Image (spheres, rainbow, N blue to C red):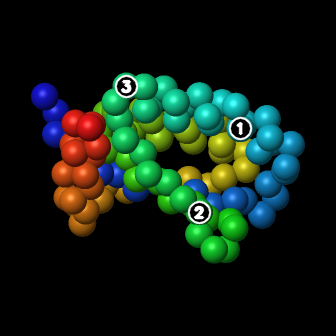
Amino acid sequence: MADKKPYVLVSVFKEDAKEQDVAQAAGKIATIIDDWNAKGNMIWSGSFDDNKTAMSVIEGDQATAEGFFNTYNDACKSFLSSYMYQWDAMPLLSLLGQKQAAQ
């Protein structure tokens, strides 16, 4: 079994983002997240106070995390600039995710 690690996705609205692009992508984004959760994967996300930037934390092996990011980025690239980083600083997330899955 591949090692699961936390990954951070940071997304920032582009200056030329159009509301209709965001609205059109909303359903696709919800499906991407629902599919991720249905597979037993965790995702924690939230926006920052600037109303332009959001951060999500996912956990998975590298290939799975990259697949999620690529699917998400394809759905949002017309209005978001998104980046993914592997995050070694938060091993606690693995423990919390395991506890949540056990409940």
| Lateral position of residue 74 relative to residue 55, left or right | right
Mark earlier in primary sequence (2, 3): 3
Considering only vertical position in the picture, is 36 above or below 21?
above
- The numbered dot on residue 39 is 3
Name which residue type carries label 1: Ala
| Lateral position of residue 23 relative to residue 86, left or right | right
Residue at x-position 62% and y-position 55%: 81
- State how far apart marks 1 and 2 are (Cα): 16 Å
In terms of secondary structure, where does tag 1 sit?
Answer: helix
- Write down the quadrant of residue 14 in the picture: bottom right
Q: Residues within 10 Å of mark 3 (few under 14, many from 20)?
A: few
Name which residue type carries label 3: Lys
Relative image position of residue 35 (x, y in whole percent) = 48, 26
- Write down the quadrant of residue 47 in the picture: bottom right
Relative image position of residue 87 (x, y in whole percent) = 29, 59
* 30 or 18, nearer to the observer: 30
Residue at x-position 82% and y-position 58%: 16
In terms of secondary structure, where does tag 2 sit?
Answer: strand
In terms of secondary structure, where does tag 3 sit?
Answer: loop
Rendered-image quadrant of the N terminus:
top left
Residue at x-position 72% and y-position 36%: 25
Name which residue type carries label 2: Ser
Circle 1 is placed at which residue position?
26
| Callouts 2 and 3 close, C-beta under 8 Å | no
- The numbered dot on residue 47 is 2
Relative image position of residue 3 (x, y in whole percent) = 16, 39
- State how far apart marks 2 and 3 are (Cα): 24 Å
- Write down the quadrant of residue 46 in the picture: bottom right
